[in-house]
Image (cartoon, rainbow, N blue to C red):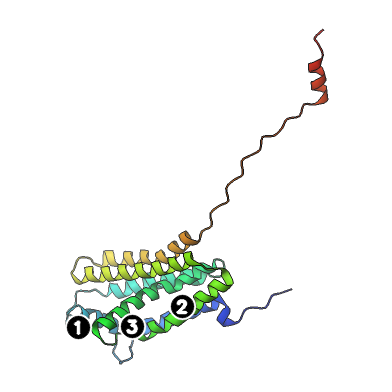
Amino acid sequence: MISAAPPRWHDLGWLVFAALALTLLHQFEENGLDLTGRPAGLLNALCTGFGFRDAVACPVPLSVITGLNVGTVWIAALIAVLTVHRHPLLGLTVFAVPLGTLILHIGAAVGLMRYNSGLATALLLLPLAAWTLLVAAHRFGAGPKAFAALFAAAVLSAAVTFALLLAARHGMVGDGVIVPAFVLLGLLPAGLMLLATRRARPPVAPASKARTRRSPARAQNRTQAPL
């Protein structure tokens, strides 16, 4: 008998794909047109936040945007989407980098007391992430280890991104460091989730010593005295 498919809002694969679509919208708000109609708002916001007039006068290279969006976001998101049906908890990592960028967006909004490009869609990801975690806990037994791995990946991705931005602002790193670093950062969420949720192998039972039984013929020969 074929079991009925769960409703979409209880289907982890569908929720992960919805998160990917919302991430694409988030990138458009950051790098296309934001809610104020400003193009390429993220790079301009970064540069003005660092004290520069605009992106032209800013030492932060365009590779920061490319490396973060293509290297980190899409590598982590595609791993989650492609593995969610075989390894459901890996699907949760689609939220790791967006939650990390949410930390940066909220920090910038609070610090500067104004809207920044990407803030609105980053906030929209939060309820979707919370609901997906509830579904994963109810249907697939996601527990504290999986949640800790997800939030650790989010915090680490935010910290590494901020560190790379500061280093680029001071001219300490260039394209040769920024792009590979963001690519490796895209592998971090899946790696942490695998480490946190792997099941320990049950201990191997010691092999019992086989009891050797003597054949009746050999036992009879041993009881007879030699002629």
Q: At which x and y percent is residue 107?
A: 29, 78
Kindly report which numbered mark, 2 or 1, lies closer to the viewer in this rendering.
2
In terms of depth relative to the viewer, which is nearer, 59 or 99?
Answer: 99
Q: At which x and y percent is residue 125?
A: 43, 81
Q: What residue does disc 1 label?
A: 54
Please determine whether, in this image, residue 33 is positioned above or below residue 131: below
Query: Of the residues shown, which amino acid type is indicated by label 2?
Result: Ala
Q: At which x and y percent is residue 50?
A: 20, 77
Distance Cα–Cα, label 2 vs label 1: 34 Å
Q: Are marks 2 and 3 in contact (CB under 8 Å)?
A: no
Q: Residue at x 22, y 68 (%)?
A: 167
- Point out which mark residue 138 bears: none
Please determine whether, in this image, residue 179 is positioned above or below residue 212: below
Q: Quadrant of residue 153?
A: bottom left
For the N terminus, the image quarter is bottom right
Please determine whether, in this image, residue 9 is positioned above or below residue 187: below
- Point out which mark residue 30 bears: 3
